[in-house]
Protein backbone atom coordinates (compact mmCIF):
# COMPACT_ATOMS: atom_id res chain seq x y z
CA UNK A 1 0.00 0.00 0.00
CA UNK A 2 1.30 3.45 -0.93
CA UNK A 3 1.98 6.08 1.71
CA UNK A 4 -0.63 8.82 1.36
CA UNK A 5 0.31 10.68 4.54
CA UNK A 6 1.34 13.91 2.78
CA UNK A 7 -1.65 13.93 0.44
CA UNK A 8 -4.08 13.19 3.28
CA UNK A 9 -2.76 16.19 5.24
CA UNK A 10 -4.06 18.46 2.47
CA UNK A 11 -7.62 17.06 2.48
CA UNK A 12 -10.12 19.54 4.00
CA UNK A 13 -12.61 18.82 6.77
CA UNK A 14 -15.52 19.47 4.42
CA UNK A 15 -18.27 17.41 2.77
CA UNK A 16 -17.67 15.96 -0.66
CA UNK A 17 -17.23 12.92 -2.87
CA UNK A 18 -14.01 10.91 -3.19
CA UNK A 19 -12.80 8.57 -5.93
CA UNK A 20 -10.31 5.75 -5.44
CA UNK A 21 -8.14 4.76 -8.43
CA UNK A 22 -6.03 1.71 -9.28
CA UNK A 23 -2.59 1.65 -10.91
CA UNK A 24 -4.16 2.07 -14.38
CA UNK A 25 -5.94 5.26 -13.29
CA UNK A 26 -9.32 3.50 -13.35
CA UNK A 27 -11.87 4.62 -10.72
CA UNK A 28 -12.58 1.55 -8.58
CA UNK A 29 -14.66 3.10 -5.80
CA UNK A 30 -16.72 6.26 -5.32
CA UNK A 31 -17.92 7.40 -1.90
CA UNK A 32 -19.19 10.46 -0.09
CA UNK A 33 -18.52 11.92 3.35
CA UNK A 34 -19.58 14.71 5.68
CA UNK A 35 -15.89 15.07 6.49
CA UNK A 36 -13.55 14.09 3.66
CA UNK A 37 -10.36 14.13 5.75
CA UNK A 38 -11.71 11.78 8.43
CA UNK A 39 -13.27 9.38 5.93
CA UNK A 40 -10.21 9.12 3.69
CA UNK A 41 -7.88 8.67 6.68
CA UNK A 42 -10.00 5.72 7.85
CA UNK A 43 -9.01 3.73 4.75
CA UNK A 44 -5.29 4.02 5.38
CA UNK A 45 -5.18 3.49 9.14
CA UNK A 46 -6.01 0.47 11.25
CA UNK A 47 -6.59 -3.14 10.17
CA UNK A 48 -9.10 -3.99 7.43
CA UNK A 49 -10.65 -7.27 6.34
CA UNK A 50 -12.80 -8.57 3.51
CA UNK A 51 -13.91 -6.17 0.80
CA UNK A 52 -12.30 -3.13 2.46
CA UNK A 53 -8.94 -4.92 2.59
CA UNK A 54 -9.15 -5.80 -1.13
CA UNK A 55 -10.15 -2.23 -1.97
CA UNK A 56 -7.29 -0.66 0.01
CA UNK A 57 -4.77 -3.04 -1.56
CA UNK A 58 -6.01 -1.99 -5.01
CA UNK A 59 -5.78 1.79 -4.36
CA UNK A 60 -2.92 3.54 -6.16
CA UNK A 61 -4.29 7.08 -5.89
CA UNK A 62 -7.36 9.04 -4.83
CA UNK A 63 -9.12 12.26 -5.75
CA UNK A 64 -11.90 14.23 -4.10
CA UNK A 65 -14.41 16.95 -4.95
CA UNK A 66 -15.54 19.32 -2.21
CA UNK A 67 -19.26 20.19 -2.12
CA UNK A 68 -21.26 22.77 -0.20
CA UNK A 69 -23.58 20.22 1.43
CA UNK A 70 -24.02 16.51 2.09
CA UNK A 71 -26.91 16.41 -0.41
CA UNK A 72 -24.64 17.74 -3.15
CA UNK A 73 -22.01 15.13 -2.27
CA UNK A 74 -24.67 12.40 -2.46
CA UNK A 75 -25.86 13.60 -5.88
CA UNK A 76 -22.27 13.75 -7.10
CA UNK A 77 -21.51 10.29 -5.70
CA UNK A 78 -24.45 8.65 -7.49
CA UNK A 79 -23.68 10.53 -10.72
CA UNK A 80 -20.08 9.29 -10.69
CA UNK A 81 -21.14 5.72 -9.85
CA UNK A 82 -23.46 5.73 -12.87
CA UNK A 83 -20.71 7.13 -15.07
CA UNK A 84 -17.79 4.93 -13.99
CA UNK A 85 -19.48 1.78 -12.69
CA UNK A 86 -16.69 1.21 -10.10
CA UNK A 87 -15.87 -2.40 -9.25
CA UNK A 88 -16.12 -1.98 -5.46
CA UNK A 89 -19.43 -0.10 -5.43
CA UNK A 90 -22.75 -1.94 -5.24
CA UNK A 91 -23.66 -3.18 -8.70
CA UNK A 92 -27.22 -4.40 -9.11
CA UNK A 93 -27.74 -7.04 -11.77
CA UNK A 94 -28.19 -5.40 -15.14
CA UNK A 95 -30.74 -7.93 -16.37
CA UNK A 96 -33.00 -7.55 -13.31
CA UNK A 97 -36.12 -5.50 -13.99
CA UNK A 98 -39.41 -5.52 -12.14
CA UNK A 99 -42.72 -6.22 -13.85
CA UNK A 100 -45.67 -3.89 -13.44
CA UNK A 101 -49.26 -4.30 -14.55
CA UNK A 102 -50.20 -1.51 -16.94
CA UNK A 103 -53.74 -0.44 -17.86
CA UNK A 104 -53.53 1.96 -20.77
CA UNK A 105 -55.64 5.11 -20.94
CA UNK A 106 -56.33 4.66 -24.64
CA UNK A 107 -59.81 4.97 -26.10
CA UNK A 108 -59.91 1.17 -26.08
CA UNK A 109 -57.68 0.17 -23.12
CA UNK A 110 -55.32 -2.79 -22.89
CA UNK A 111 -54.02 -4.62 -19.83
CA UNK A 112 -50.54 -6.09 -19.92
CA UNK A 113 -47.37 -6.88 -17.97
CA UNK A 114 -44.57 -4.40 -18.66
CA UNK A 115 -40.99 -3.93 -17.56
CA UNK A 116 -38.74 -0.86 -17.50
CA UNK A 117 -41.52 1.15 -15.88
CA UNK A 118 -39.55 4.40 -16.03
CA UNK A 119 -39.81 4.25 -19.84
CA UNK A 120 -43.59 3.86 -19.81
CA UNK A 121 -45.89 6.74 -20.71
CA UNK A 122 -46.90 8.51 -17.52
CA UNK A 123 -50.53 8.80 -18.57
CA UNK A 124 -51.12 5.06 -18.12
CA UNK A 125 -52.08 3.32 -14.87
CA UNK A 126 -49.19 1.33 -13.35
CA UNK A 127 -49.56 -1.19 -10.53
CA UNK A 128 -46.67 -2.94 -8.85
CA UNK A 129 -43.86 -3.74 -8.75
CA UNK A 130 -44.45 -7.50 -8.79
CA UNK A 131 -41.13 -9.29 -8.11
CA UNK A 132 -42.95 -12.52 -9.01
CA UNK A 133 -43.52 -12.15 -12.76
CA UNK A 134 -45.53 -15.39 -12.86
CA UNK A 135 -48.08 -13.94 -10.44
CA UNK A 136 -48.30 -10.73 -12.48
CA UNK A 137 -48.89 -12.60 -15.74
CA UNK A 138 -51.41 -14.90 -14.11
CA UNK A 139 -53.35 -11.88 -12.82
CA UNK A 140 -53.33 -10.19 -16.24
CA UNK A 141 -54.39 -13.38 -18.03
CA UNK A 142 -57.25 -13.86 -15.58
CA UNK A 143 -58.52 -10.27 -15.96
CA UNK A 144 -58.19 -10.42 -19.74
CA UNK A 145 -60.31 -13.57 -19.77
CA UNK A 146 -62.99 -12.08 -17.55
CA UNK A 147 -63.12 -8.66 -19.22
CA UNK A 148 -63.32 -8.22 -23.02
CA UNK A 149 -60.57 -5.62 -23.27
CA UNK A 150 -58.72 -4.86 -26.47
CA UNK A 151 -56.00 -7.49 -26.97
CA UNK A 152 -54.16 -6.30 -30.11
CA UNK A 153 -51.49 -3.61 -30.14
CA UNK A 154 -52.94 -2.03 -33.29
CA UNK A 155 -56.55 -2.25 -34.40
CA UNK A 156 -57.06 -4.85 -37.14
CA UNK A 157 -59.19 -4.54 -40.24
CA UNK A 158 -61.31 -7.50 -39.16
CA UNK A 159 -62.41 -8.98 -35.85
CA UNK A 160 -60.08 -11.69 -34.55
CA UNK A 161 -60.40 -14.91 -32.56
CA UNK A 162 -60.71 -13.03 -29.24
CA UNK A 163 -63.98 -11.50 -30.45
CA UNK A 164 -65.41 -14.89 -31.39
CA UNK A 165 -64.54 -16.39 -27.97
CA UNK A 166 -66.06 -13.33 -26.25
CA UNK A 167 -62.78 -11.99 -24.85
CA UNK A 168 -62.88 -8.81 -26.96
CA UNK A 169 -65.73 -6.47 -27.94
CA UNK A 170 -64.51 -6.18 -31.54
CA UNK A 171 -63.23 -2.63 -31.18
CA UNK A 172 -61.83 -2.68 -34.72
CA UNK A 173 -65.31 -2.95 -36.34
CA UNK A 174 -68.00 -2.62 -33.68
CA UNK A 175 -69.40 0.46 -31.99
CA UNK A 176 -68.65 0.04 -28.29
CA UNK A 177 -70.47 1.98 -25.60
CA UNK A 178 -67.95 4.16 -23.73
CA UNK A 179 -69.92 3.59 -20.51
CA UNK A 180 -69.26 -0.15 -20.83
CA UNK A 181 -65.52 0.53 -21.15
CA UNK A 182 -65.48 2.86 -18.13
CA UNK A 183 -67.35 0.26 -16.07
CA UNK A 184 -64.76 -2.38 -16.92
CA UNK A 185 -61.88 -0.03 -16.10
CA UNK A 186 -63.45 0.86 -12.76
CA UNK A 187 -63.79 -2.78 -11.70
CA UNK A 188 -60.28 -3.70 -12.92
CA UNK A 189 -58.66 -0.77 -11.10
CA UNK A 190 -60.58 -1.66 -7.95
CA UNK A 191 -59.28 -5.24 -8.12
CA UNK A 192 -55.66 -4.14 -8.70
CA UNK A 193 -56.03 -1.93 -5.62
CA UNK A 194 -57.16 -4.88 -3.53
CA UNK A 195 -60.97 -4.86 -3.84
CA UNK A 196 -61.90 -8.23 -5.31
CA UNK A 197 -65.69 -7.84 -4.84
CA UNK A 198 -66.57 -7.18 -8.49
CA UNK A 199 -64.34 -9.86 -9.99
CA UNK A 200 -65.31 -12.54 -7.46
CA UNK A 201 -68.99 -11.86 -8.15
CA UNK A 202 -68.35 -12.01 -11.89
CA UNK A 203 -66.57 -15.37 -11.59
CA UNK A 204 -69.36 -16.81 -9.43
CA UNK A 205 -71.99 -15.79 -11.99
CA UNK A 206 -70.03 -17.25 -14.89
CA UNK A 207 -69.38 -20.42 -12.88
CA UNK A 208 -73.10 -20.82 -12.26
CA UNK A 209 -73.92 -20.26 -15.95
CA UNK A 210 -71.31 -22.82 -17.00
CA UNK A 211 -72.66 -25.35 -14.51
CA UNK A 212 -76.25 -24.87 -15.70
CA UNK A 213 -75.08 -25.36 -19.29
CA UNK A 214 -73.36 -28.58 -18.10
CA UNK A 215 -69.99 -27.14 -19.13
CA UNK A 216 -68.38 -28.64 -16.05
CA UNK A 217 -64.81 -28.24 -17.33
CA UNK A 218 -65.23 -24.46 -17.57
CA UNK A 219 -67.05 -24.36 -14.22
CA UNK A 220 -64.11 -26.18 -12.55
CA UNK A 221 -61.63 -23.81 -14.19
CA UNK A 222 -63.56 -20.80 -12.84
CA UNK A 223 -63.74 -22.40 -9.38
CA UNK A 224 -59.96 -22.82 -9.35
CA UNK A 225 -59.57 -19.21 -10.46
CA UNK A 226 -61.73 -18.07 -7.54
CA UNK A 227 -59.63 -20.10 -5.10
CA UNK A 228 -56.43 -18.61 -6.53
CA UNK A 229 -57.76 -15.10 -5.84
CA UNK A 230 -58.71 -16.01 -2.27
CA UNK A 231 -55.29 -17.53 -1.56
CA UNK A 232 -53.40 -14.62 -3.15
CA UNK A 233 -55.31 -11.95 -1.24
CA UNK A 234 -55.09 -13.87 2.02
CA UNK A 235 -51.30 -14.07 1.64
CA UNK A 236 -50.97 -10.42 0.73
CA UNK A 237 -53.29 -8.74 3.21
CA UNK A 238 -51.64 -6.77 5.99
CA UNK A 239 -53.84 -5.66 8.86
CA UNK A 240 -52.71 -2.04 9.08
CA UNK A 241 -56.15 -0.53 9.46
CA UNK A 242 -55.87 1.59 6.29
CA UNK A 243 -54.76 1.40 2.68
CA UNK A 244 -51.12 2.38 3.07
CA UNK A 245 -48.93 3.02 0.01
CA UNK A 246 -45.23 2.62 0.77
CA UNK A 247 -42.03 0.66 0.39
CA UNK A 248 -40.26 -0.51 3.53
CA UNK A 249 -36.55 -1.28 3.81
CA UNK A 250 -34.51 -2.87 6.58
CA UNK A 251 -31.24 -4.77 6.87
CA UNK A 252 -29.15 -7.13 8.95
CA UNK A 253 -25.34 -7.31 8.89
CA UNK A 254 -23.07 -10.07 10.14
CA UNK A 255 -19.71 -11.57 9.15
CA UNK A 256 -19.06 -9.11 6.30
CA UNK A 257 -22.48 -9.78 4.72
CA UNK A 258 -25.23 -7.17 4.38
CA UNK A 259 -28.72 -8.67 4.01
CA UNK A 260 -31.42 -6.28 2.72
CA UNK A 261 -35.22 -6.71 2.62
CA UNK A 262 -37.68 -4.47 0.76
CA UNK A 263 -41.47 -4.83 1.20
CA UNK A 264 -43.73 -3.34 -1.48
CA UNK A 265 -47.06 -2.33 0.12
CA UNK A 266 -49.83 -0.98 -2.10
CA UNK A 267 -53.33 -0.22 -0.85
CA UNK A 268 -52.73 -2.33 2.25
CA UNK A 269 -51.53 -5.29 0.15
CA UNK A 270 -48.05 -6.76 0.27
CA UNK A 271 -47.66 -7.07 -3.51
CA UNK A 272 -44.13 -8.45 -3.23
CA UNK A 273 -40.71 -8.15 -1.71
CA UNK A 274 -37.11 -7.93 -2.81
CA UNK A 275 -34.24 -9.54 -0.91
CA UNK A 276 -30.54 -9.26 -1.52
CA UNK A 277 -27.32 -10.20 0.23
CA UNK A 278 -24.18 -8.17 -0.45
CA UNK A 279 -20.67 -9.18 0.52
CA UNK A 280 -19.46 -5.99 2.17
CA UNK A 281 -17.77 -4.68 5.28
CA UNK A 282 -17.63 -1.04 4.14
CA UNK A 283 -19.53 1.70 5.96
CA UNK A 284 -23.09 0.35 6.48
CA UNK A 285 -24.85 3.70 6.19
CA UNK A 286 -23.05 4.53 2.97
CA UNK A 287 -23.63 1.08 1.48
CA UNK A 288 -27.33 1.04 2.39
CA UNK A 289 -27.91 4.55 1.07
CA UNK A 290 -26.13 3.68 -2.16
CA UNK A 291 -28.15 0.49 -2.51
CA UNK A 292 -31.47 2.33 -2.08
CA UNK A 293 -30.66 5.05 -4.60
CA UNK A 294 -29.26 2.58 -7.14
CA UNK A 295 -32.29 0.31 -6.69
CA UNK A 296 -34.87 3.04 -7.32
CA UNK A 297 -32.94 4.48 -10.21
CA UNK A 298 -33.05 1.03 -11.79
CA UNK A 299 -36.74 0.23 -11.32
CA UNK A 300 -37.69 3.77 -12.28
CA UNK A 301 -40.87 4.14 -10.21
CA UNK A 302 -40.81 5.61 -6.71
CA UNK A 303 -43.28 4.79 -3.94
CA UNK A 304 -45.34 7.57 -2.35
CA UNK A 305 -43.50 6.96 0.91
CA UNK A 306 -40.39 5.08 2.04
CA UNK A 307 -39.96 3.58 5.52
CA UNK A 308 -36.34 3.06 6.61
CA UNK A 309 -34.37 2.15 9.79
CA UNK A 310 -33.04 4.92 12.02
CA UNK A 311 -29.44 4.39 10.89
CA UNK A 312 -30.28 6.30 7.69
CA UNK A 313 -30.60 10.06 7.22
CA UNK A 314 -34.29 10.44 6.29
CA UNK A 315 -34.01 14.11 5.34
CA UNK A 316 -31.08 13.41 3.01
CA UNK A 317 -32.92 10.55 1.26
CA UNK A 318 -36.14 12.60 1.04
CA UNK A 319 -34.28 15.52 -0.54
CA UNK A 320 -32.65 13.25 -3.12
CA UNK A 321 -35.67 11.08 -3.97
CA UNK A 322 -38.24 13.89 -3.60
CA UNK A 323 -40.63 11.66 -1.65
CA UNK A 324 -41.57 11.23 2.00
CA UNK A 325 -38.97 9.18 3.91
CA UNK A 326 -39.70 8.29 7.53
CA UNK A 327 -38.40 6.14 10.34
CA UNK A 328 -41.32 4.69 12.35
CA UNK A 329 -40.66 4.73 16.08
CA UNK A 330 -43.77 2.92 17.36
CA UNK A 331 -47.00 1.22 16.41
CA UNK A 332 -47.83 -1.15 13.56
CA UNK A 333 -45.40 0.37 11.08
CA UNK A 334 -42.51 -0.06 13.54
CA UNK A 335 -43.55 -3.70 13.99
CA UNK A 336 -43.55 -4.10 10.20
CA UNK A 337 -40.07 -2.57 10.03
CA UNK A 338 -38.95 -5.07 12.69
CA UNK A 339 -40.51 -7.86 10.64
CA UNK A 340 -38.38 -6.82 7.65
CA UNK A 341 -35.33 -6.96 9.94
CA UNK A 342 -36.23 -10.51 11.02
CA UNK A 343 -36.70 -11.53 7.38
CA UNK A 344 -33.31 -10.06 6.48
CA UNK A 345 -31.73 -11.96 9.38
CA UNK A 346 -33.41 -15.25 8.47
CA UNK A 347 -32.45 -14.89 4.79
CA UNK A 348 -28.81 -14.35 5.74
CA UNK A 349 -28.85 -17.38 8.05
CA UNK A 350 -30.29 -19.53 5.23
CA UNK A 351 -27.77 -18.31 2.67
CA UNK A 352 -24.66 -17.64 4.75
CA UNK A 353 -23.13 -21.11 4.60
CA UNK A 354 -23.66 -21.29 0.85
CA UNK A 355 -22.23 -17.79 0.38
CA UNK A 356 -19.20 -18.60 2.53
CA UNK A 357 -18.59 -21.86 0.66
CA UNK A 358 -18.91 -20.10 -2.73
CA UNK A 359 -16.56 -17.33 -1.59
CA UNK A 360 -14.01 -19.88 -0.38
CA UNK A 361 -14.22 -21.79 -3.67
CA UNK A 362 -13.78 -18.60 -5.68
CA UNK A 363 -10.83 -17.43 -3.58
CA UNK A 364 -9.24 -20.85 -3.90
CA UNK A 365 -9.73 -20.85 -7.70
CA UNK A 366 -8.31 -17.32 -8.02
CA UNK A 367 -5.25 -18.28 -5.98
CA UNK A 368 -4.69 -21.36 -8.16
CA UNK A 369 -5.02 -19.23 -11.31
CA UNK A 370 -2.50 -16.64 -10.04
CA UNK A 371 0.03 -19.34 -9.21
CA UNK A 372 -0.56 -21.11 -12.52
CA UNK A 373 0.04 -17.97 -14.58
CA UNK A 374 2.65 -16.48 -12.19
CA UNK A 375 0.59 -13.31 -11.84
CA UNK A 376 0.34 -11.06 -8.78
CA UNK A 377 -3.33 -10.30 -9.39
CA UNK A 378 -6.13 -11.82 -11.44
CA UNK A 379 -9.52 -10.24 -10.90
CA UNK A 380 -11.16 -9.03 -14.11
CA UNK A 381 -11.63 -11.56 -16.90
CA UNK A 382 -13.19 -11.02 -20.35
CA UNK A 383 -14.31 -13.99 -22.45
CA UNK A 384 -15.38 -14.11 -26.11
CA UNK A 385 -17.39 -16.34 -28.43
CA UNK A 386 -19.08 -16.06 -31.83
CA UNK A 387 -22.27 -17.50 -33.28
CA UNK A 388 -23.34 -17.97 -36.88
CA UNK A 389 -25.54 -19.98 -39.19
CA UNK A 390 -24.18 -21.75 -42.28
CA UNK A 391 -21.00 -19.70 -41.96
CA UNK A 392 -22.89 -16.43 -42.35
CA UNK A 393 -24.66 -13.80 -40.28
CA UNK A 394 -21.98 -13.77 -37.58
CA UNK A 395 -22.45 -12.12 -34.21
CA UNK A 396 -20.06 -11.91 -31.26
CA UNK A 397 -20.47 -11.85 -27.52
CA UNK A 398 -18.25 -10.77 -24.63
CA UNK A 399 -18.90 -11.56 -20.98
CA UNK A 400 -17.04 -9.99 -18.06
CA UNK A 401 -16.24 -11.62 -14.73
CA UNK A 402 -14.69 -10.11 -11.62
CA UNK A 403 -13.27 -12.59 -9.11
CA UNK A 404 -15.31 -15.24 -10.96
CA UNK A 405 -18.56 -13.30 -10.46
CA UNK A 406 -20.41 -12.11 -13.60
CA UNK A 407 -20.69 -8.36 -14.26
CA UNK A 408 -23.73 -8.54 -16.53
CA UNK A 409 -23.98 -4.81 -16.97
CA UNK A 410 -20.63 -4.96 -18.77
CA UNK A 411 -21.52 -7.75 -21.20
CA UNK A 412 -21.30 -6.61 -24.83
CA UNK A 413 -22.81 -7.78 -28.13
CA UNK A 414 -21.24 -7.32 -31.54
CA UNK A 415 -22.79 -7.39 -34.99
CA UNK A 416 -20.10 -8.49 -37.40
CA UNK A 417 -19.56 -7.32 -40.97
CA UNK A 418 -21.48 -9.37 -43.56
CA UNK A 419 -18.19 -9.76 -45.45
CA UNK A 420 -16.87 -12.01 -42.66
CA UNK A 421 -17.20 -15.67 -43.62
CA UNK A 422 -15.16 -17.58 -41.03
CA UNK A 423 -14.77 -17.88 -37.25
CA UNK A 424 -11.25 -16.46 -37.02
CA UNK A 425 -12.07 -13.35 -39.05
CA UNK A 426 -15.16 -12.81 -36.91
CA UNK A 427 -13.14 -13.17 -33.71
CA UNK A 428 -10.43 -10.86 -35.08
CA UNK A 429 -13.03 -8.15 -35.74
CA UNK A 430 -14.64 -8.45 -32.30
CA UNK A 431 -11.32 -8.39 -30.42
CA UNK A 432 -10.00 -5.43 -32.37
CA UNK A 433 -13.19 -3.42 -31.83
CA UNK A 434 -13.20 -4.22 -28.11
CA UNK A 435 -9.59 -3.40 -27.29
CA UNK A 436 -9.27 -0.44 -29.65
CA UNK A 437 -12.13 1.08 -27.66
CA UNK A 438 -10.44 0.13 -24.37
CA UNK A 439 -7.30 1.90 -25.59
CA UNK A 440 -9.00 5.01 -27.01
CA UNK A 441 -11.41 5.55 -24.10
CA UNK A 442 -9.04 4.46 -21.32
CA UNK A 443 -11.43 1.77 -20.16
CA UNK A 444 -10.47 -0.79 -17.54
CA UNK A 445 -8.36 -3.52 -19.07
CA UNK A 446 -8.89 -7.12 -18.03
CA UNK A 447 -6.20 -9.02 -16.19
CA UNK A 448 -6.98 -12.04 -18.35
CA UNK A 449 -8.65 -12.78 -21.71
CA UNK A 450 -10.40 -16.15 -21.92
CA UNK A 451 -10.86 -17.55 -25.42
CA UNK A 452 -13.45 -20.21 -26.16
CA UNK A 453 -11.17 -22.31 -28.33
CA UNK A 454 -7.72 -23.71 -28.87
CA UNK A 455 -4.41 -22.42 -30.18
CA UNK A 456 -5.81 -20.74 -33.34
CA UNK A 457 -8.22 -18.58 -31.32
CA UNK A 458 -5.50 -17.76 -28.79
CA UNK A 459 -3.12 -16.74 -31.60
CA UNK A 460 -5.75 -14.40 -33.07
CA UNK A 461 -6.25 -12.80 -29.66
CA UNK A 462 -2.49 -12.39 -29.15
CA UNK A 463 -2.12 -10.91 -32.63
CA UNK A 464 -4.74 -8.22 -31.89
CA UNK A 465 -3.45 -7.44 -28.37
CA UNK A 466 0.15 -7.14 -29.64
CA UNK A 467 -0.90 -4.95 -32.60
CA UNK A 468 -2.52 -2.49 -30.17
CA UNK A 469 0.53 -2.42 -27.91
CA UNK A 470 -1.37 -3.86 -24.96
CA UNK A 471 -0.08 -6.33 -22.39
CA UNK A 472 -2.87 -8.71 -21.34
CA UNK A 473 -2.52 -12.39 -20.53
CA UNK A 474 -4.53 -14.84 -22.64
CA UNK A 475 -5.66 -18.42 -22.11
CA UNK A 476 -7.71 -20.76 -24.29
CA UNK A 477 -10.22 -23.41 -23.31
CA UNK A 478 -9.70 -26.15 -25.88
CA UNK A 479 -12.24 -28.89 -26.59
CA UNK A 480 -11.75 -32.53 -27.51
CA UNK A 481 -13.41 -34.42 -30.37
CA UNK A 482 -16.56 -34.80 -28.29
CA UNK A 483 -16.75 -30.99 -27.99
CA UNK A 484 -15.97 -31.11 -24.29
CA UNK A 485 -13.41 -28.77 -22.76
CA UNK A 486 -10.50 -30.92 -21.69
CA UNK A 487 -7.43 -28.66 -21.59
CA UNK A 488 -6.48 -25.07 -20.77
CA UNK A 489 -3.62 -23.58 -22.82
CA UNK A 490 -1.46 -20.47 -22.50
CA UNK A 491 -0.43 -17.92 -25.20
CA UNK A 492 2.11 -20.33 -26.65
CA UNK A 493 -0.35 -23.21 -26.86
CA UNK A 494 1.21 -25.06 -23.96
CA UNK A 495 -1.27 -27.02 -21.82
CA UNK A 496 -1.52 -25.78 -18.23
CA UNK A 497 -1.53 -28.34 -15.38
CA UNK A 498 -5.16 -27.93 -14.31
CA UNK A 499 -7.11 -30.96 -13.15
CA UNK A 500 -10.56 -31.37 -14.69
CA UNK A 501 -12.16 -31.73 -11.26
CA UNK A 502 -10.46 -28.67 -9.72
CA UNK A 503 -12.28 -25.51 -8.61
CA UNK A 504 -10.39 -23.48 -11.21
CA UNK A 505 -11.47 -25.76 -14.07
CA UNK A 506 -15.07 -25.57 -12.83
CA UNK A 507 -15.12 -21.74 -12.70
CA UNK A 508 -13.43 -21.35 -16.09
CA UNK A 509 -15.92 -23.81 -17.59
CA UNK A 510 -18.77 -21.71 -16.20
CA UNK A 511 -17.35 -18.64 -17.94
CA UNK A 512 -17.08 -20.61 -21.16
CA UNK A 513 -20.68 -21.83 -20.92
CA UNK A 514 -21.92 -18.30 -20.15
CA UNK A 515 -20.20 -16.64 -23.11
CA UNK A 516 -21.43 -19.39 -25.42
CA UNK A 517 -25.00 -18.96 -24.12
CA UNK A 518 -24.76 -15.19 -24.47
CA UNK A 519 -23.60 -15.27 -28.09
CA UNK A 520 -26.15 -17.92 -29.09
CA UNK A 521 -28.99 -16.05 -27.36
CA UNK A 522 -28.07 -12.82 -29.12
CA UNK A 523 -28.15 -14.57 -32.47
CA UNK A 524 -31.54 -16.11 -31.75
CA UNK A 525 -32.94 -12.83 -30.46
CA UNK A 526 -32.00 -11.06 -33.67
CA UNK A 527 -34.12 -13.54 -35.58
CA UNK A 528 -36.99 -13.84 -33.12
CA UNK A 529 -37.41 -10.06 -32.90
CA UNK A 530 -37.92 -9.81 -36.62
CA UNK A 531 -34.59 -8.17 -37.35
CA UNK A 532 -34.34 -10.23 -40.54
CA UNK A 533 -34.51 -7.48 -43.10
CA UNK A 534 -30.89 -8.23 -44.00
CA UNK A 535 -31.38 -11.99 -44.02
CA UNK A 536 -31.45 -12.29 -47.79
CA UNK A 537 -28.28 -10.21 -48.07
CA UNK A 538 -26.23 -12.70 -46.08
CA UNK A 539 -27.43 -15.98 -47.61
CA UNK A 540 -25.08 -17.16 -50.38
CA UNK A 541 -26.83 -17.43 -53.74
CA UNK A 542 -29.30 -14.59 -53.19
CA UNK A 543 -28.41 -11.46 -55.13
CA UNK A 544 -30.36 -8.27 -55.61
CA UNK A 545 -32.49 -9.72 -58.43
CA UNK A 546 -33.46 -12.87 -56.53
CA UNK A 547 -34.03 -10.83 -53.38
CA UNK A 548 -36.55 -8.60 -55.15
CA UNK A 549 -38.26 -11.62 -56.71
CA UNK A 550 -38.58 -13.33 -53.32
CA UNK A 551 -40.04 -10.23 -51.70
CA UNK A 552 -42.37 -9.69 -54.66
CA UNK A 553 -43.68 -13.25 -54.47
CA UNK A 554 -43.96 -13.58 -50.68
CA UNK A 555 -44.33 -9.85 -49.80
CA UNK A 556 -42.93 -10.38 -46.27
CA UNK A 557 -40.52 -12.55 -44.34
CA UNK A 558 -43.48 -13.91 -42.36
CA UNK A 559 -45.02 -15.37 -45.50
CA UNK A 560 -41.59 -16.52 -46.62
CA UNK A 561 -41.25 -18.49 -43.38
CA UNK A 562 -44.63 -20.13 -43.99
CA UNK A 563 -43.55 -21.20 -47.48
CA UNK A 564 -42.33 -24.73 -48.19
CA UNK A 565 -38.92 -25.50 -49.72
CA UNK A 566 -40.67 -26.34 -53.00
CA UNK A 567 -42.41 -22.95 -53.06
CA UNK A 568 -39.14 -21.16 -52.38
CA UNK A 569 -37.39 -23.17 -55.09
CA UNK A 570 -39.70 -21.62 -57.67
CA UNK A 571 -37.63 -18.44 -57.26
CA UNK A 572 -34.18 -19.69 -56.25
CA UNK A 573 -32.28 -22.93 -56.62
CA UNK A 574 -33.19 -25.90 -54.43
CA UNK A 575 -29.94 -25.57 -52.41
CA UNK A 576 -30.57 -21.90 -51.62
CA UNK A 577 -34.25 -22.65 -50.89
CA UNK A 578 -33.20 -25.22 -48.30
CA UNK A 579 -30.83 -22.72 -46.65
CA UNK A 580 -33.53 -20.03 -46.47
CA UNK A 581 -36.05 -22.51 -45.08
CA UNK A 582 -33.65 -23.87 -42.44
CA UNK A 583 -32.49 -20.41 -41.39
CA UNK A 584 -36.04 -19.18 -40.85
CA UNK A 585 -37.05 -22.24 -38.85
CA UNK A 586 -33.90 -22.66 -36.76
CA UNK A 587 -35.01 -20.34 -33.92
Image (cartoon, rainbow, N blue to C red):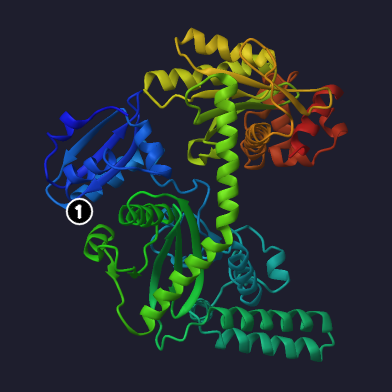
Pinpoint residue 288: horizontal percent, then vertical percent. 36, 56
Quadrant of the rendering where the C terminus is positioned = top right
Pinpoint residue 396: horizontal percent, then vertical percent. 60, 27
Pinpoint residue 479: horizontal percent, then vertical percent. 76, 24
Q: Secondary structure at mark 1?
A: helix
Left or right: 219 with respect to 509?
right
Give the residue at x 64% y 73%. 142
Which quarter of the figure has residue 363? Answer: top right
Nearer to us in this view, 417 or 60: 60
Q: Is residue 86 visible?
A: no
Which quarter of the figure has residue 312? Answer: bottom left
Nearer to us in this view, 551 or 391: 391
Left or right: 301 with respect to 104?
left
Against 544, is 570 above or below? Answer: below
Against 306, is 28 above or below? Answer: above
Classify 10 Å Cα crowding around label 1: few (below 14), some (14-19), many (20 and above): some
Q: Is residue 33 visible?
A: yes
Left or right: 397 with respect to 22?
right
Quadrant of the rendering where the N terminus is positioned = top left
Q: Which residue is mark 1?
A: 71
Pinpoint residue 153: horizontal percent, then vertical percent. 57, 57
Q: How many numbered marks have been drawn onto this rendered protein structure?
A: 1
Nearer to us in this view, 313 or 235: 313
Seen as rendered, the residue at the extreme front is 47
Nearer to us in this view, 215 or 49: 49
Give the residue at x 45% y 71%. 340
Amino acid sequence: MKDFKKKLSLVPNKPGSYQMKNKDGIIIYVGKAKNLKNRLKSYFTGVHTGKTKRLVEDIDDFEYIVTSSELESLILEITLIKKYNPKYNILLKDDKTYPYIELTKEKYPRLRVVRNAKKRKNHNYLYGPYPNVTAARKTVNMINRLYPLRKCEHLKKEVCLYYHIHECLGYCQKEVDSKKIEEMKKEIIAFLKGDSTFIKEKIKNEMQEASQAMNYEKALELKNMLEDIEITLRKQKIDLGKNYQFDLINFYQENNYLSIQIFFVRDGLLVGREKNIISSDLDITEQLTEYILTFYDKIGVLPKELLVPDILDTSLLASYLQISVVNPKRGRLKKLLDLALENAKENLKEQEETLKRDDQLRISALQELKELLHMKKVSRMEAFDNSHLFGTFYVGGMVVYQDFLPLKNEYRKYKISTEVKDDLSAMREVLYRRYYKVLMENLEKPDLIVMDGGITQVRVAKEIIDSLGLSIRIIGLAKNKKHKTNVIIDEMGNPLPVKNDSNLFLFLSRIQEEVHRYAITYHRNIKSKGMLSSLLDVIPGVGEVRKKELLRKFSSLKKMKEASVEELSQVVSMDVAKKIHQYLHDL
